[in-house]
Image (cartoon, grey):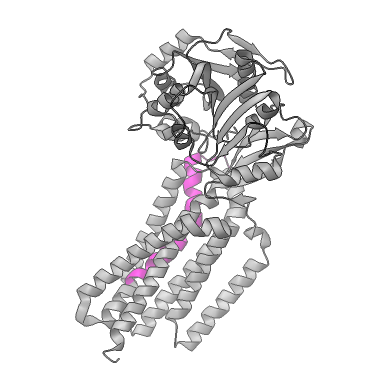
Amino acid sequence: MQEKTRPILSAGYGAVLFLSSAAALVLEIVAGRLLAPYVGMSLYTWTAIISVVLAGLTIGHWIGGRLAERPGPSPLARRRAAIALALAALGSAACLPLLRFGAGPLLATGMHPVAAIVTLATLLFLLPSLFAGIVSPILTKLAVDADPGHTGRVLGRMYALGAAGSILGTLAAGYLFISWIGSVGTVLAVTGLYAILALTLLAGQRRASLALLTGLVLLGAGIAVTPRALASPCAVESDYYCLRVEDFGPESGRESRVLVLDHLGHGINDADEPQLFHSSYLHFSDEMAARRFGRQSISAFFIGGGAYTLPRAWSQGFAEPHLHVAEIDPAVTRIAQDRLWLDKDAKGLVIDHRDARLALQSLPREPQFDVVFGDAFHDIGIPPHLVTREFHAEIAARLKPGGFYAVNVIEARQQPLFLFALLKTLARDFAAVEVWVDGDEMAQGERVTYLVLASDRASDTPILRSSRFFPRHWLRLRGDQVRQAIAKAEIPELTDDFSPVDRLMAHVLLAPEIAEK
């Protein structure tokens, strides 16, 4: 080999390593979106994904190191790396049918949620990561052999290129691929990149290239004849959620639809009657607002839009509404307009596509709202920065006298630790902190939707009965008993420095039953 071509060849191996590392991290990031419609996007999901991918890369590096030290000419080493890349392409493509056809039966076995998440992540992402990991040691050895006079420099460059590729893959997946081509398209792009890199390494090896190309054609044909495997469960994939709308008519007996974000329902809208609340916690908030303020005027700030069920109802149910909705995801608003009968020009409606905390803090720090309504969720938990004392102080400063902050909390019937921590924190900024429950829901299930009300004054009744539509009633839990339970529980006050929502809700997130908001 001529001396001038050695550095060029070494740089070529570096380019392949850079791109294969990027592909591996793209698959890791898209893994979260792939699993979200089945198991949600909790801390436990991401922990499983990251652990499985790192385990695969680790095993792959070890195997690749053993292969790299085997004697043989460079074309044989390149062929080994190409086979690993081809298998990585096959493993990536196999994620889609395995997920579509295997997730349901696996989750239906009744396996513990953490075990199910780890098992699913392992079945889908261990092998693609393992085969991608094999490539790095082989390519590094080839690069050193191609430029033996600069071993240290070559090693440093290969390590740097692998890390840089990983960074690029992470950024590309998070900011480009998922938003532009969706999770299925991203997986297919990773598959294609692995295949191209494999063929590149086989340049000049005609028989091996032909065999690999034949295998890839068969793989593509197999994918093409199984369109169901490529069908995404998402109607829309945004930067934040997998969104879809399902018909709720069979359950309600009316024309109605439910918005599903990832794997949980987030609001049910009725086509003809916006003020008909299928969800009890929304019905409660509407009745409490009417009891305190009447039906003439209302000024409200919404932490999260979801299906826009309550803003849609209040824009018609109050004569003079001012409704400021902070919904971080524009795709949620669009699907509410397109499929859930939201009129973006409804009376008094202002839509703000920013994080709710940022949106609220950008408003003057003065009393201006009758109601602040919290309905922002990450899986079934509230985002940590929206439950801290610092944020509660911002809410309290913007509530009018007699106004209230309402937030629903999905928690366990026994020892609801997150609920206790939230109540303890709210008590620092609100004179009256109440817990309400649906009178019928308290008699069933291990999970309860608690309705938390924080204000400068207590409600004037311990029982609230619905005045229209569904015959519901809500009960206020005895304040002394709630305070005693909080005092006995060893729970922290939630602050911007320490807000362990996932730990406090672990007993709920990991419970076998599936929650629906």
Q: Nearer the viewer, residue 311 or 152?
A: 311
Q: Nearer the viewer, residue 342 or 217?
A: 342
Tell me the residue at 48%/10% (across/down): 479
Q: Residue 290 in the image: state x and y as whole percent.
A: 64, 17
Tell me the residue at 30%/73% (across/down): 140
Say above or below: 294 vs 100: above
Q: Residue 423 in the image: state x and y as whole percent.
A: 44, 20
Is residue 17 in sight in this rendering? yes
Q: Quadrant of the C terminus?
A: top right
Horizontal relation, residue 88 to residue 69: left or right: right
Q: Of helix, strand and loop, which mostly describes the magenta segment? A: helix
Furthest residue in direction bottom, as rendered: 2
Say above or below: 291 vs 109: above
The image quarter containing residue 307 is top right
The stretch of residues the image draws in magenta is 109-137
Q: Residue 351 in the image: state x and y as whole percent.
A: 58, 38
> Is residue 363 on the magenta stretch?
no
Horizontal relation, residue 69 to residue 500: left or right: left
Say above or below: 173 vs 499: below
